[in-house]
Image: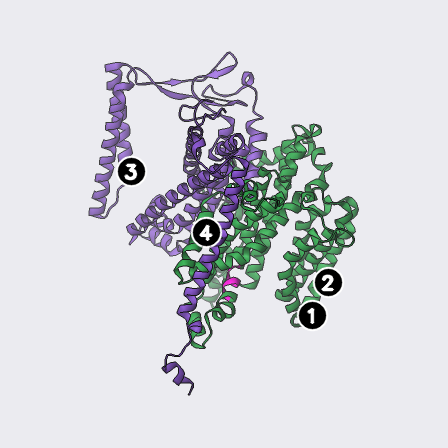
Amino acid sequence: MTFKESDHGAVPFWRDERYIQIIAQVIVVAFLIILGYWLIHNLLTGLESLGIPLSFRFLGIESQFDIGEALIDYSRNSTYARALLVGILNTIKVSFLGIIFATIFGIIIGIARLSKNWLVNKLAAIYVEALRNIPLLVFLIFLSTTVFHKLPRVNQALSAWGWAFLTNRGIYIVWPQPAGGWGVYKWFLLGSFIVGVIVAAFKFREGKRTGRMPLYWLWGFVVFAVLAAITWLIAQFVAGPPMYLDFPSLQGRNFKGGKSLTPEFMAIFSGLVIYTSAFIAEVVRAGIQSVSKGQREAATAVGLTGFQTMRLVIFPQAMRVIIPPLTSQYLNLTKNSSLAIAVGYPDLFAVGSTIVNQSGRAVEVILIMMGVYLTFSLLTSLFMNWYNKYTSLVER
Amino acid sequence: MTTLTPSKEILPPPTERITILGWMKKNLFGSIGDTILTFVAGAFLLWLLYAIFHWIFFTARWAAVTDNLQLYMKGQYPGSEDWRLWLLMFLLGLLIGLAWGIFLKRAEAVGWVLLIIPIILAVWMFALGRQSWPHFLLIDVLAIIGYFLGKRYPKKLARPTYILILLYMPLVILIVRGFGSGGFLKLVPTNLWGGLLLSLLLAIFGIVFSFPIGVLLALGRQSKMPALKTLSVLYIEIIRGVPLITLLFMGQLMLPFFLPAGITIDRVIRATVAIIMFAAAYMAENVRGGLQSIPKGQYEAADAIGLSGWQKMVFIILPQALRAVIPVLVGQFIGLFKDTSLVALVGLLDLLGIARGILANPNYIGRQLEVFSFIALIYWVFSYGMSYGSRRLEIALGVGER
């Protein structure tokens, strides 16, 4: 009898799953719209009554504050927009370099963590466990106040055989500078690089065709290095030496020459690298351990050397496991670079909060900052997703 | 007979005999490269240990730490209300003991209880004054009583223990904050909270309040309703794409604007709102992992016995999904505990904020190494203790093997 009702299609609409879903969604969306309207209405009226209506025109005003280090020309007379750009570039600089160095250190520590040598293994374990369990901010402030600002004064600088000087005003390292022959040589260098890439690509295709993959990147690099060295000699004959090494030296009250790195940059950079490398080490270790033991034994059985086993058998398979968590570590590093404010490095967040203090435009600046960080995150994950697809395609 | 005697001599494999020298040869001096590595690493380790010990016992001046232990631990929380904190710790000891007794049963677990509780509470105990050792002893005694009670009456006590564990964090908030203007459990305003107490409270607040939001967001992200799904995905991805510090900054600077004129909320709550918003997005992703681990058959079985969508979620899917993500949630709690240090950047006096405040005192100028080592050690002991404890519990309970 009960079946008859449903035969008539008599399920009332308030018990019909499809209607319920639509109604629920309409209610939620309507609620959110009303809530959002109420919040934004409060915001706009509040800002209006303070005399700072929501607008991005303030970006054209002169900033009137200095920034410690900038990759582009910047002065007190530059606009707020340019100050933000300086901050964005500084964030990119520290994140980009940080990611590269953290990956290198992370891989080294991760492999050391798997070392058969008990002492090396335990040292790596201590490194990882010590860092993973303290907050990054504490570590950064620790580094900044107890290491980089406690270095000796300029006139008593710690010297590393004259190649580098450590002082509390920064670190000065020897750096190549372009000289007379540079105008010619830079074209030679570009040419050598292109030839190197072509050779690498050629070797890569040959490896694909024959199934015996050579060390194509090493081929490319060697060709590039040899060409660069030969053309250096040619450039020296034609137009003098292309570059010279600029040694830092104490002149007056400060060091001149070479490359200078501020203590603020060194604190945030080394802090991010050391801290993230501990996490990357764990990712790498888990990845390598995920490759089954039989793979290693099989590789040994067919006569591969230790290095070949790592390069051809273990690493390609480990990569598949490593890349997703590695991506989130890269994202974390980029986001964590916002803690630079605690050590005084002028990244996006530090510049942004200075602008807020100066202009009172909290809402606009926060929106811009969030937008920029969101863009960074999206770009990083897009790139890593692409790379992930690329590595997983190679395997199968 | 003659064939047996030699085989008997051959039988014991030589690798079975582990001697110190043999172990060292295998693990430290396997090859020339290994030997060099061992000597370099050993020299480095010895130098490091020497430097650290020399610094701790001879160079360092610990006055900046020992003079202000109370500040580090609880900020300005009034001394007359200390008993509330102790009460909570007694309860924690009892609960840990009960849980151990009911769920682990093995005798070796007593050792772990006795080991882990002191590690986690030692710092606190030490700080609330030397005369507090009886309190500390009581925590241990309660833990042991809890263990034996739990072991004796596992059936009767299981349910109350579960409920108490679930209620513990809300209870912490209630007791620490209090209510009313005077008398028993009077309100302690949030601007008096500080130090480790504030750090822990922020993490507890974050986990407790982000939990329901996170579950809803995870369900929204999994649902087939397009509007809900889009909104959940947007929220989760936007929050996960920006640093926590921008959210805290937003909480401090923008939150007052969003509310109608005249309503003000204090800084601790503003920071808490930001932390909850942040934690909810990560919580949602963790819960989603749990939801995805539930086999499809469970959904179909629930449909087959005629459960509605809500019943299916509440009675079948969520209990299993949440049990699967408990270890991940412990990890998130540890991460959140470390992340609370960021509130120092917006002017709150958590453990890090207090440390910076103390360093600004002219009496303790230049004592950064001592102070930051001390608070780093506190963070380390708590984070490592929690992760170690949860790992042991995971192994014992066989989570992930089911």
- Are dots 3 and 4 on a single chain? no
Would residue B322 be counted in the magenta stretch? yes
Q: Mark 4 to mark 1: distance in Å?
A: 48 Å
Type of amino acid at the residue the image marks with label 4: Tyr
The residue that disc 4 covers is B235
Q: Which amino acid type corresponds to the residue marked 3 in the rendered image?
A: Trp
Can the viewer see residue B30? Answer: no
Circle 1 residue: B152
Give the camera-side residue of A225 and B302. Answer: B302
Tell me the crowding category of disc 3: few under 14, some 14 to 19, or many 20 or more residues within 10 angstroms, Cα based: some
Chain hosting mark 3: A
- Image colour for chain B is green
Q: Which of marks 1 and 3 is in front?
A: 1
Q: In this view, does A240 lie to the left or right of A25?
A: left
Residue A184 locus on image (x, y percent): 25, 19
Mark pair 2, 3: CA separation: 66 Å
> Which stretch is magenta?
B320-325
Q: Mark 2 points at which residue?
A: B145
Depth check: give the residue in front, A111 or A136: A136
Q: Is mark 4 on a helix, strand or loop?
A: helix
Q: Do the residues labelled 1 and 3 touch (CB within 8 Å)?
A: no
Q: Determine the CA span between mark 3 and mark 4.
A: 42 Å
Q: Chain A is drawn in which colour?
A: purple
Q: Answer with mark 4 or mark 1, whichever residue precedes in sequence.
A: 1
Tell me residue A236's x, y (percent). Answer: 27, 16
In the picture, the quarter occupied by the C terminus of chain A is bottom left
Q: What percent of the width, then of the height, locates residue A3?
A: 40, 84
